[in-house]
Amino acid sequence: MKVHHLKSWISTFENVAHGSCQQWPKQFEIRRNDRDFANGDTVVLWEFNAAEGALTGRFVVLTEIGPVVDGRFGLPAGLCVFGWRHQSDMGQVAPADIDRARREARWSR
């Protein structure tokens, strides 16, 4: 099983991390399937500030993703949708330590 590190714009990240979308957390992602997402993989969402073009250091770990639906049920080929079974509390690393944290992380269930 793979670990995928993905950028997430601030508003979308907030919806996942805190359920700020009308009090309901976002429970799925629609993405280009350019990373070969598979059932059971782990996704680390990193908050991305598009205005500054930089990661903020905040992250959420989403484990046991699935089912990964790709190019079916009305989705164009190359797009997929998936949910997740478990979600960590939001974490934070200093922006200067983001690259090291991404390289050294051992995300577990």
Image (cartoon, rainbow, N blue to C red):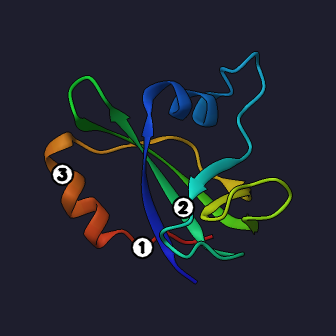
Identify residue type, mark 3. Asp
Alpha carbon separation for disc pair 3 and 2? 19 Å
Instruction: Identify the residue under disc 2.
Output: 43
Identify residue type, mark 1. Arg
Disc 1 is placed on an element classified as loop
Alpha carbon separation for disc pair 1 and 2? 12 Å
Q: Residue at x 47, y 67 (%)?
A: 4
Looking at the image, which is closer to me, 34 or 51?
34
Disc 2 is placed on an element classified as strand
Query: Which percent across, then down, holds residue 94?
Result: 22, 41
- 68 over 51 or under it: above or below: below
How many dots with numbers? 3
Instruction: Identify the residue under disc 1.
Output: 106
* Residues packed near mark 2 inside 10 Å, few (<14), some (14 to 19) or many (20 plus): many
Q: Residue at x 26, y 70 (%)?
A: 103
N-terminal label among 1 and 2: 2
N-terminal label among 1 and 3: 3
Query: Which percent across, then down, holds residue 47?
Result: 40, 38
Q: Quadrant of residue 41?
A: bottom right
* Residues packed near mark 3 inside 10 Å, few (<14), some (14 to 19) or many (20 plus): few
Identify residue type, mark 2. Val
- Do labels 1 and 3 touch, CB within 8 Å? no
Instruction: Identify the residue under disc 3.
Output: 97
N-terminal label among 3 and 2: 2
Query: Which percent across, then down, holds residue 15?
Result: 62, 29
Q: Nearer the viewer, mark 3 or mark 2?
A: 2
Instruction: Find residue 68 and name its label.
Output: none
